[in-house]
């Protein structure tokens, strides 16, 4: 229950603050922990006069996220195999505009967040605040206690790293059709149909967390990726169910085995072909996803 105006301010800004923390950390659980710490700091300042509530809370959450990320870097350095973020799952809305989905995917997609993991914390924070939340370099400098010129350098380096991603088309009807054809090809182990969908430079990343079967390294190119996907389809032929969903605002699906979530996947589409496939099978991350509805 909201007790006062101070609480109201925090709750109104909460979606923005969660968005910053999640993009910084790639984990909803860690993002919630950051917001809890930010809330405690906010309540401790309840009687203080703050000139700009949004700027203050953005700074607090950004710096708490950086501190958390530095601790997580040590843990993730020992992570078995490729790492993928804990996904945010939403039902597909037929009325969602392609432009809106593309804009969100550019700051939220599984592919982008996996690549963000390679950035140093300050570069990651600068990229998130600049590209996802449109902060000026002066505002970012205030958040990070740095000079605007330094933030520009961090931004340039981050954008150079992120430039390897191919952004998707803005045609939701076409993209949903590609997802449906992909699911069909997988479920029938139809290699020819799958090859028609894959970009020549396609990549596949699967995250088993050392607790579920997954490729031990990223796979690149049509040959490696198609062989892996067809093998998956044949291994579980006739036993899988699921439904199409938005995974971090990309097209994807929840796959079930015996009514339990077996995996979550998303695809990246560019130029009318699939340029990336991302499969999450780590049971610790899957346990945080609600049970899917029937297909």
Image (tube, rainbow, N blue to C red):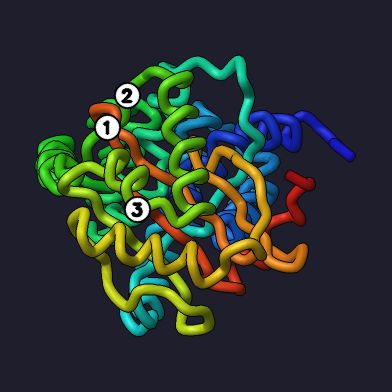
Q: Is residue 283 left or right of residue 221?
A: right
> Element type at marker 1?
strand
Residue hosting label 3: 191
Nearer to me, 211 or 221 = 221
Instruction: Give x and y (percent) for residue 205.
Output: 34, 62
Q: Earlier in the sequence, mark 3 or mark 2?
A: 2
**Vertical side of 278 occupied by 247: above or below:** above
Q: Position of residue 142 (x, y in %)?
A: 31, 39
Residue 41 is at least partly visible in this image: no
In depth, the one of 84 and 17 nearer the eye is 84
Relative to 150, 12 lies left or right: right
- The span from disc 1 to disc 2 (Cα, nearest Å) is 6 Å
Left/right of residue 157 with respect to residue 281 in the rendered view: left
Please name which of the two marks, 3 or 1, marks the residue nearer to the observer: 3
Q: Which residue is mark 2?
A: 169
Give the quadrant of the N terminus.
top right
Q: Quadrant of the C terminus?
A: top right
Label 3, label 1: how far apart the Cα atoms are: 20 Å
Residue under the point 42% across and 27% down = 175
Pointer 1 with pointer 2, Cβ within 8 A? yes
**Residue ID for mark 1:** 270
Could you say where residue 82 lies in the image, as x and y percent from the top left?
34, 71
Question: Looking at the image, which residue is at 57% across and 68% down?
Answer: 236
């Amino acid at each position: 229950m909201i007790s006062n105006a101070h609480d109201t301010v925090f709750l109104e800004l909460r979606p923005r603050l969660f968005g910053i923390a999640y993009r910084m950390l790639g984990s909803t659980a860690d993002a919630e922990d950051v917001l809890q710490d930010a809330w405690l700091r906010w309540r401790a300042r309840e009687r203080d006069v703050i000139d700009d509530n949004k700027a203050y809370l953005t700074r607090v959450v950004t710096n708490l996220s950086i501190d958390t990320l530095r601790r997580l870097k040590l843990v993730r350095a020992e992570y078995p195999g490729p790492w993928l973020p804990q996904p945010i799952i939403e039902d597909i809305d037929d009325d969602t505009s392609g432009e809106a989905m593309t804009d969100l995917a550019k700051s939220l997609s599984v592919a982008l967040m996996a690549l963000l993991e390679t950035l140093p914390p300050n570069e990651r924070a600068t990229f998130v605040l600049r590209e996802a939340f449109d902060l000026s370099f002066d505002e970012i400098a205030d958040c990070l206690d740095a000079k605007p010129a330094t933030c520009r350098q961090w931004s340039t380096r981050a954008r150079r790293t992120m430039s390897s991603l191919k952004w998707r088309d803005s045609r939701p009807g076409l993209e949903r059709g590609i997802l449906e054809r992909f699911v069909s090809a997988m479920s029938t182990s139809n290699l020819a149909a799958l090859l028609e969908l894959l970009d020549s430079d396609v990549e596949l990343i699967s995250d088993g967390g050392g607790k579920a079967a997954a490729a031990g390294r990223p796979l690149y190119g049509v040959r490696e990726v198609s062989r892996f996907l067809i093998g998956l389809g044949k291994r579980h032929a006739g036993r899988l169910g699921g439904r199409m969903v938005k995974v971090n605002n990309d097209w994807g699906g929840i796959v079930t085995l015996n009514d339990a979530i077996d995996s979550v996947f998303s695809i990246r589409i560019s130029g009318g072909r699939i340029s990336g496939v991302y499969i999450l099978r780590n049971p610790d991350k899957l346990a945080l996803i609600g049970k899917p509805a029937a297909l």
